[in-house]
Image (cartoon, rainbow, N blue to C red):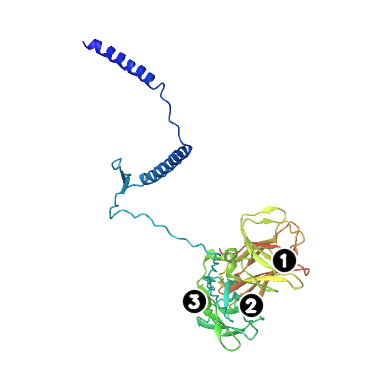
Amino acid sequence: MKRFLIPFTAIFCLLIILTGCSLFENVPLPTLDPNMIQTYAAGTVTARQTFSALETVVSILTAQPGLVLTSQPTAQPAVITATPHPVTSTPFPTATTVVIPSSTATVTPAAPSATPTQSIPCEWAHFLADVTIPDGASITPGAAFTKTWRLLNKGTCTWTTSFALVFAGGEAMGGAAVIAFPKNVAPGQSVDLSINLVAPQNTGSYTGYYQIRDANGVTFGTGSDGKTKFFVKITVAVQSLSDLHLSTQLCTAVWRTSAGAVACPSSSYDFSKGSVMVVATPKLEGGYTDNETAIVMVPSDGTGGEISGRFPGLVIKSGDHFKTLTGFMDGYTKGNVMFMLNYSADGGADQNLKTWSKTYDKNFVHIDIDLSSLAGKNVQFVLKVLNNDGSSTDDVAFWLSPQIVRP
Protein backbone atom coordinates (compact mmCIF):
# COMPACT_ATOMS: atom_id res chain seq x y z
CA MET A 1 0.00 0.00 0.00
CA LYS A 2 2.86 2.36 0.85
CA ARG A 3 4.54 1.87 -2.46
CA PHE A 4 1.54 3.56 -4.35
CA LEU A 5 1.25 6.58 -1.94
CA ILE A 6 4.24 8.61 -3.14
CA PRO A 7 3.44 8.46 -6.92
CA PHE A 8 -0.18 9.46 -6.28
CA THR A 9 0.82 12.45 -4.17
CA ALA A 10 3.22 13.71 -6.84
CA ILE A 11 0.53 13.47 -9.57
CA PHE A 12 -1.96 15.40 -7.39
CA CYS A 13 0.48 18.31 -6.78
CA LEU A 14 1.20 18.57 -10.50
CA LEU A 15 -2.49 18.89 -11.33
CA ILE A 16 -2.93 21.74 -8.81
CA ILE A 17 -0.03 23.71 -10.29
CA LEU A 18 -1.35 23.35 -13.83
CA THR A 19 -4.86 24.35 -12.77
CA GLY A 20 -3.52 27.45 -10.87
CA CYS A 21 -1.73 28.69 -13.92
CA SER A 22 -4.89 28.57 -15.97
CA LEU A 23 -6.95 30.25 -13.30
CA PHE A 24 -4.73 33.41 -13.19
CA GLU A 25 -3.95 33.50 -16.87
CA ASN A 26 -6.73 35.97 -17.70
CA VAL A 27 -6.77 38.04 -14.47
CA PRO A 28 -5.59 41.64 -15.19
CA LEU A 29 -2.76 43.18 -13.05
CA PRO A 30 -3.68 46.21 -10.90
CA THR A 31 -2.59 49.66 -12.07
CA LEU A 32 -0.20 51.36 -9.58
CA ASP A 33 -0.21 55.07 -8.82
CA PRO A 34 3.27 56.68 -9.44
CA ASN A 35 3.09 58.49 -6.08
CA MET A 36 2.62 55.17 -4.33
CA ILE A 37 5.66 53.79 -6.11
CA GLN A 38 7.83 56.70 -4.84
CA THR A 39 6.42 56.22 -1.33
CA TYR A 40 7.27 52.52 -1.37
CA ALA A 41 10.77 53.28 -2.71
CA ALA A 42 11.43 55.91 -0.05
CA GLY A 43 10.27 53.52 2.62
CA THR A 44 12.57 50.85 1.31
CA VAL A 45 15.58 53.22 1.36
CA THR A 46 14.73 54.36 4.88
CA ALA A 47 14.37 50.80 6.05
CA ARG A 48 17.71 49.87 4.56
CA GLN A 49 19.42 52.92 6.22
CA THR A 50 17.84 52.06 9.56
CA PHE A 51 18.92 48.45 9.26
CA SER A 52 22.46 49.49 8.25
CA ALA A 53 22.74 51.83 11.25
CA LEU A 54 21.43 49.11 13.52
CA GLU A 55 24.05 46.69 12.16
CA THR A 56 26.79 49.23 12.91
CA VAL A 57 25.62 49.74 16.51
CA VAL A 58 25.32 46.00 17.06
CA SER A 59 28.81 45.38 15.70
CA ILE A 60 30.28 48.09 17.97
CA LEU A 61 28.52 46.84 21.09
CA THR A 62 29.29 43.22 20.32
CA ALA A 63 33.00 44.05 20.10
CA GLN A 64 33.04 45.32 23.73
CA PRO A 65 33.21 42.75 26.50
CA GLY A 66 30.45 42.56 29.09
CA LEU A 67 27.61 43.54 26.70
CA VAL A 68 24.84 41.02 25.81
CA LEU A 69 22.25 41.56 23.06
CA THR A 70 18.80 40.24 24.01
CA SER A 71 16.21 40.00 21.26
CA GLN A 72 12.58 40.83 22.19
CA PRO A 73 9.44 39.50 20.55
CA THR A 74 9.20 40.45 16.90
CA ALA A 75 6.26 42.74 17.60
CA GLN A 76 8.61 45.14 19.44
CA PRO A 77 11.98 46.63 18.41
CA ALA A 78 15.10 44.95 19.71
CA VAL A 79 16.34 46.26 23.06
CA ILE A 80 20.05 46.42 23.81
CA THR A 81 20.76 45.54 27.42
CA ALA A 82 24.26 46.24 28.87
CA THR A 83 25.49 43.95 31.58
CA PRO A 84 26.89 46.10 34.44
CA HIS A 85 30.65 45.85 35.05
CA PRO A 86 31.80 44.30 38.29
CA VAL A 87 33.12 46.69 40.92
CA THR A 88 36.63 45.47 40.35
CA SER A 89 36.61 46.05 36.62
CA THR A 90 38.30 49.10 35.11
CA PRO A 91 35.75 51.73 34.05
CA PHE A 92 35.68 52.87 30.46
CA PRO A 93 37.61 56.09 29.94
CA THR A 94 35.64 59.22 29.45
CA ALA A 95 36.42 61.70 26.76
CA THR A 96 38.95 64.38 27.72
CA THR A 97 39.31 67.71 26.06
CA VAL A 98 42.97 68.39 25.17
CA VAL A 99 44.04 72.01 24.84
CA ILE A 100 47.03 72.49 22.53
CA PRO A 101 48.98 75.63 23.42
CA SER A 102 49.58 78.09 20.67
CA SER A 103 53.35 78.06 21.35
CA THR A 104 55.79 75.73 23.08
CA ALA A 105 57.30 77.09 26.29
CA THR A 106 61.12 77.20 26.34
CA VAL A 107 62.68 75.81 29.50
CA THR A 108 66.08 77.31 30.31
CA PRO A 109 68.26 74.83 32.23
CA ALA A 110 69.68 76.05 35.48
CA ALA A 111 73.28 77.18 35.26
CA PRO A 112 75.70 74.61 36.70
CA SER A 113 77.17 75.49 40.01
CA ALA A 114 80.65 76.93 39.74
CA THR A 115 83.52 74.52 40.53
CA PRO A 116 85.44 75.83 43.50
CA THR A 117 89.01 76.76 42.59
CA GLN A 118 91.95 76.13 44.87
CA SER A 119 93.64 79.23 46.16
CA ILE A 120 97.37 79.12 45.44
CA PRO A 121 99.46 80.46 48.32
CA CYS A 122 101.94 83.24 47.79
CA GLU A 123 104.79 81.18 49.28
CA TRP A 124 104.78 77.47 48.47
CA ALA A 125 107.63 75.09 47.58
CA HIS A 126 107.59 71.73 45.79
CA PHE A 127 110.37 69.15 46.24
CA LEU A 128 111.81 68.00 42.89
CA ALA A 129 114.93 65.93 43.65
CA ASP A 130 117.85 65.12 45.91
CA VAL A 131 120.65 66.37 43.70
CA THR A 132 123.25 64.91 46.08
CA ILE A 133 123.18 62.48 49.02
CA PRO A 134 120.04 60.39 48.48
CA ASP A 135 118.04 59.47 51.58
CA GLY A 136 119.87 56.88 53.67
CA ALA A 137 123.24 57.39 51.98
CA SER A 138 126.10 55.77 53.87
CA ILE A 139 128.65 58.26 55.19
CA THR A 140 131.75 57.40 57.18
CA PRO A 141 132.10 58.90 60.70
CA GLY A 142 133.36 62.49 60.62
CA ALA A 143 133.24 62.76 56.81
CA ALA A 144 132.37 66.13 55.28
CA PHE A 145 129.67 66.21 52.60
CA THR A 146 127.38 68.64 50.79
CA LYS A 147 123.61 68.11 50.60
CA THR A 148 121.75 69.72 47.69
CA TRP A 149 117.96 69.86 47.19
CA ARG A 150 116.19 70.97 44.01
CA LEU A 151 112.99 72.90 44.81
CA LEU A 152 110.29 74.43 42.61
CA ASN A 153 108.58 77.75 43.38
CA LYS A 154 104.94 76.58 43.27
CA GLY A 155 103.50 79.75 44.77
CA THR A 156 102.61 83.11 43.26
CA CYS A 157 105.39 85.24 44.80
CA THR A 158 109.03 85.51 43.75
CA TRP A 159 111.70 84.20 46.11
CA THR A 160 114.36 86.87 46.34
CA THR A 161 117.91 86.81 47.64
CA SER A 162 116.42 88.05 50.94
CA PHE A 163 114.98 84.53 51.37
CA ALA A 164 117.06 81.88 53.11
CA LEU A 165 117.43 78.15 53.71
CA VAL A 166 117.07 77.64 57.48
CA PHE A 167 117.62 74.74 59.86
CA ALA A 168 114.27 73.58 61.33
CA GLY A 169 115.11 70.72 63.67
CA GLY A 170 116.70 67.29 63.97
CA GLU A 171 120.47 66.84 63.61
CA ALA A 172 122.35 69.97 62.52
CA MET A 173 125.47 67.93 61.62
CA GLY A 174 127.68 71.01 61.82
CA GLY A 175 125.74 72.92 59.15
CA ALA A 176 124.99 76.65 59.11
CA ALA A 177 121.66 77.70 60.63
CA VAL A 178 120.90 80.20 57.83
CA ILE A 179 122.05 80.23 54.18
CA ALA A 180 120.94 83.06 51.86
CA PHE A 181 119.36 82.23 48.51
CA PRO A 182 121.84 82.28 45.61
CA LYS A 183 119.40 84.02 43.21
CA ASN A 184 115.85 85.25 42.69
CA VAL A 185 113.38 82.47 41.85
CA ALA A 186 110.17 83.44 40.04
CA PRO A 187 106.98 81.35 40.25
CA GLY A 188 107.41 78.22 38.12
CA GLN A 189 111.21 78.29 38.35
CA SER A 190 113.46 75.93 40.34
CA VAL A 191 116.56 76.41 42.46
CA ASP A 192 119.27 74.17 43.92
CA LEU A 193 119.87 74.82 47.62
CA SER A 194 123.05 73.39 49.18
CA ILE A 195 124.50 73.11 52.67
CA ASN A 196 127.87 71.79 53.83
CA LEU A 197 127.61 69.19 56.61
CA VAL A 198 129.82 66.81 58.60
CA ALA A 199 128.71 63.29 59.54
CA PRO A 200 128.63 62.57 63.30
CA GLN A 201 131.42 60.42 64.76
CA ASN A 202 129.03 57.79 66.12
CA THR A 203 127.40 55.28 63.78
CA GLY A 204 123.64 55.37 63.30
CA SER A 205 120.90 57.13 61.34
CA TYR A 206 120.71 60.95 61.38
CA THR A 207 118.13 63.36 59.94
CA GLY A 208 118.19 67.14 59.70
CA TYR A 209 115.09 69.20 58.76
CA TYR A 210 114.95 72.46 56.79
CA GLN A 211 112.51 75.11 55.54
CA ILE A 212 112.57 78.38 53.61
CA ARG A 213 112.34 81.73 55.39
CA ASP A 214 111.05 84.83 53.59
CA ALA A 215 112.19 88.44 54.00
CA ASN A 216 109.65 88.96 56.82
CA GLY A 217 110.87 85.99 58.85
CA VAL A 218 107.92 83.72 57.90
CA THR A 219 108.91 80.09 57.24
CA PHE A 220 107.27 77.74 54.75
CA GLY A 221 108.01 74.48 53.00
CA THR A 222 106.55 71.80 50.74
CA GLY A 223 103.52 69.50 50.80
CA SER A 224 99.83 70.22 50.32
CA ASP A 225 99.84 72.64 53.26
CA GLY A 226 103.03 74.42 52.23
CA LYS A 227 104.49 73.76 55.70
CA THR A 228 106.15 70.33 55.28
CA LYS A 229 109.86 70.30 56.03
CA PHE A 230 112.37 68.80 53.60
CA PHE A 231 115.35 66.95 55.03
CA VAL A 232 118.74 65.30 54.75
CA LYS A 233 118.95 61.71 56.02
CA ILE A 234 122.19 59.74 56.26
CA THR A 235 123.47 56.53 57.78
CA VAL A 236 126.83 56.82 59.49
CA ALA A 237 128.72 53.55 59.20
CA VAL A 238 132.26 52.24 58.92
CA GLN A 239 132.70 51.24 55.29
CA SER A 240 133.50 47.65 54.41
CA LEU A 241 135.64 46.28 51.60
CA SER A 242 132.64 46.17 49.25
CA ASP A 243 132.37 49.98 49.52
CA LEU A 244 135.84 50.44 48.05
CA HIS A 245 134.52 50.27 44.46
CA LEU A 246 133.70 53.94 43.78
CA SER A 247 131.43 53.20 40.81
CA THR A 248 129.00 51.40 43.15
CA GLN A 249 128.94 54.49 45.38
CA LEU A 250 128.52 57.07 42.59
CA CYS A 251 125.69 59.10 44.06
CA THR A 252 127.04 59.20 47.59
CA ALA A 253 129.58 61.63 46.14
CA VAL A 254 128.95 65.36 45.80
CA TRP A 255 129.14 66.28 42.09
CA ARG A 256 129.81 69.81 40.90
CA THR A 257 130.92 71.67 37.80
CA SER A 258 131.89 75.28 37.17
CA ALA A 259 128.17 75.74 36.30
CA GLY A 260 126.96 74.43 39.68
CA ALA A 261 125.68 71.18 41.21
CA VAL A 262 125.08 68.18 38.93
CA ALA A 263 122.23 65.69 39.27
CA CYS A 264 123.38 62.14 39.95
CA PRO A 265 123.09 60.16 37.83
CA SER A 266 122.62 62.41 34.80
CA SER A 267 120.18 61.23 32.16
CA SER A 268 122.50 61.91 29.20
CA TYR A 269 125.83 63.44 28.22
CA ASP A 270 125.61 67.20 28.78
CA PHE A 271 128.30 69.10 26.88
CA SER A 272 127.12 72.45 28.25
CA LYS A 273 126.68 72.09 32.03
CA GLY A 274 128.48 68.77 32.51
CA SER A 275 127.21 65.34 33.54
CA VAL A 276 128.10 62.10 35.33
CA MET A 277 126.81 58.52 35.18
CA VAL A 278 127.82 54.87 35.50
CA VAL A 279 127.98 52.80 32.30
CA ALA A 280 127.93 49.01 32.45
CA THR A 281 130.11 47.10 29.93
CA PRO A 282 131.42 50.37 28.38
CA LYS A 283 132.76 50.52 24.83
CA LEU A 284 136.12 52.26 25.15
CA GLU A 285 138.11 54.21 22.55
CA GLY A 286 139.35 51.89 19.82
CA GLY A 287 136.22 49.71 20.06
CA TYR A 288 137.16 47.58 23.05
CA THR A 289 134.22 46.63 25.33
CA ASP A 290 135.02 45.88 28.97
CA ASN A 291 132.94 43.86 31.44
CA GLU A 292 133.67 46.28 34.33
CA THR A 293 131.52 49.34 35.08
CA ALA A 294 132.89 52.81 34.36
CA ILE A 295 132.25 56.26 35.80
CA VAL A 296 131.73 58.52 32.74
CA MET A 297 132.31 62.26 33.29
CA VAL A 298 131.72 65.24 30.95
CA PRO A 299 133.14 68.61 32.11
CA SER A 300 131.18 71.84 31.69
CA ASP A 301 131.82 73.93 28.58
CA GLY A 302 133.95 77.04 28.27
CA THR A 303 137.24 78.20 29.71
CA GLY A 304 137.90 76.55 33.08
CA GLY A 305 135.14 73.98 32.46
CA GLU A 306 135.39 71.00 34.82
CA ILE A 307 133.49 68.37 36.80
CA SER A 308 134.40 66.81 40.16
CA GLY A 309 132.98 64.26 42.57
CA ARG A 310 133.87 64.18 46.28
CA PHE A 311 133.31 60.74 47.84
CA PRO A 312 132.62 59.98 51.50
CA GLY A 313 135.65 59.38 53.72
CA LEU A 314 137.37 56.02 54.09
CA VAL A 315 139.95 55.05 56.69
CA ILE A 316 143.04 53.95 54.75
CA LYS A 317 145.15 50.98 55.79
CA SER A 318 148.80 50.32 55.04
CA GLY A 319 149.22 48.57 51.71
CA ASP A 320 146.04 50.03 50.15
CA HIS A 321 146.31 51.05 46.47
CA PHE A 322 144.11 53.25 44.28
CA LYS A 323 143.69 51.62 40.84
CA THR A 324 141.80 52.55 37.66
CA LEU A 325 142.04 52.77 33.86
CA THR A 326 141.22 56.10 32.14
CA GLY A 327 140.46 57.30 28.61
CA PHE A 328 137.51 58.24 26.35
CA MET A 329 134.37 56.45 25.29
CA ASP A 330 134.59 55.08 21.76
CA GLY A 331 133.81 57.46 18.89
CA TYR A 332 134.48 60.76 20.70
CA THR A 333 137.58 61.44 18.63
CA LYS A 334 138.05 65.12 19.58
CA GLY A 335 138.32 64.43 23.30
CA ASN A 336 141.04 66.39 25.11
CA VAL A 337 140.97 66.58 28.94
CA MET A 338 143.03 66.61 32.11
CA PHE A 339 142.43 63.94 34.77
CA MET A 340 143.10 64.71 38.44
CA LEU A 341 143.00 62.47 41.53
CA ASN A 342 142.78 64.61 44.68
CA TYR A 343 142.07 63.83 48.31
CA SER A 344 141.30 65.42 51.68
CA ALA A 345 142.66 63.74 54.82
CA ASP A 346 140.90 64.21 58.19
CA GLY A 347 138.95 67.22 56.94
CA GLY A 348 142.02 69.11 55.72
CA ALA A 349 142.56 70.99 52.45
CA ASP A 350 142.51 69.14 49.16
CA GLN A 351 145.80 67.64 48.00
CA ASN A 352 146.74 66.22 44.61
CA LEU A 353 147.81 62.60 44.27
CA LYS A 354 148.25 62.55 40.49
CA THR A 355 147.45 64.63 37.37
CA TRP A 356 147.65 63.53 33.70
CA SER A 357 146.37 64.73 30.31
CA LYS A 358 144.67 62.57 27.70
CA THR A 359 143.56 62.89 24.08
CA TYR A 360 141.65 60.38 21.96
CA ASP A 361 144.43 58.10 20.66
CA LYS A 362 142.91 54.60 21.12
CA ASN A 363 145.16 54.02 24.13
CA PHE A 364 144.46 53.97 27.88
CA VAL A 365 146.21 55.32 30.97
CA HIS A 366 146.68 52.82 33.83
CA ILE A 367 146.72 54.30 37.35
CA ASP A 368 148.12 52.48 40.38
CA ILE A 369 148.96 54.63 43.45
CA ASP A 370 150.27 53.34 46.77
CA LEU A 371 148.24 54.92 49.64
CA SER A 372 150.38 53.64 52.53
CA SER A 373 151.42 57.20 53.43
CA LEU A 374 147.77 57.93 54.30
CA ALA A 375 147.32 54.88 56.55
CA GLY A 376 145.12 55.56 59.60
CA LYS A 377 143.60 58.74 58.10
CA ASN A 378 139.99 59.32 57.09
CA VAL A 379 140.41 60.18 53.39
CA GLN A 380 137.91 61.66 50.96
CA PHE A 381 138.86 60.98 47.34
CA VAL A 382 137.99 63.54 44.65
CA LEU A 383 137.79 62.54 40.97
CA LYS A 384 138.14 65.54 38.64
CA VAL A 385 138.13 66.09 34.85
CA LEU A 386 138.90 69.47 33.17
CA ASN A 387 138.58 70.41 29.51
CA ASN A 388 142.00 71.30 28.08
CA ASP A 389 140.97 73.63 25.26
CA GLY A 390 138.02 75.63 26.61
CA SER A 391 135.49 73.30 25.00
CA SER A 392 133.81 70.15 26.26
CA THR A 393 133.03 68.84 22.77
CA ASP A 394 133.70 65.05 22.71
CA ASP A 395 135.11 65.20 26.28
CA VAL A 396 133.37 61.97 27.33
CA ALA A 397 136.00 60.70 29.78
CA PHE A 398 135.84 57.47 31.77
CA TRP A 399 137.35 55.99 34.95
CA LEU A 400 137.10 52.22 34.57
CA SER A 401 136.35 50.46 37.88
CA PRO A 402 138.04 53.03 40.16
CA GLN A 403 138.63 51.35 43.54
CA ILE A 404 140.76 50.99 46.63
CA VAL A 405 142.52 47.63 46.40
CA ARG A 406 143.26 46.22 49.85
CA PRO A 407 145.76 43.33 50.31
Secondary structure under tag 2 reads loop
- Tell me the mark number nearer the camera, choosing from 1 and 2: 2
In this view of the protein, can residue 242 be seen by the observer?
yes
Above or below: residue 246 compared with residue 87: below
Q: Quadrant of the C terminus?
A: bottom right
212 vs 353, left or right, is: left
Q: Residue at label 2?
A: 187
Q: Residue at x 33, y 18 (%)?
A: 16
- Tell me the mark number nearer the camera, choosing from 1 and 3: 1
Q: Position of residue 142 (x, y in %)?
A: 54, 77
In the rendered structure, which amino acid carries the disc numbered 3?
Tyr
In the rendered structure, which amino acid carries the disc numbered 2?
Pro
- Whether pointer 1 and pointer 2 mark residues with C-beta atoms closer than 8 Å, the reply is no
Q: Earlier in the sequence, mark 1 or mark 3?
A: 3
Disc 1 and disc 2: Cα gap in Å? 28 Å
Q: Residue at label 3?
A: 206
Q: Quadrant of the N terminus?
A: top left
The label shown at residue 271 is: 1
Secondary structure under tag 1 reads loop
Above or below: residue 300 compared with residue 211: above
Tell me if mark 2 has few (under 14), some (14-19) or many (20+) residues whose alpha carbon lies within 10 angstroms of its own: some
- Tell me the mark number nearer the camera, choosing from 2 and 3: 2
203 vs 398, left or right, is: left
- Of 371 and 85, the residue lying toward us: 85
Identify the image quadrant of residue 293.
bottom right
Q: Position of residue 231 (x, y in %)?
A: 53, 76
- Of 239 and 67, the residue lying toward us: 67
In the rendered structure, which amino acid carries the disc numbered 1?
Phe
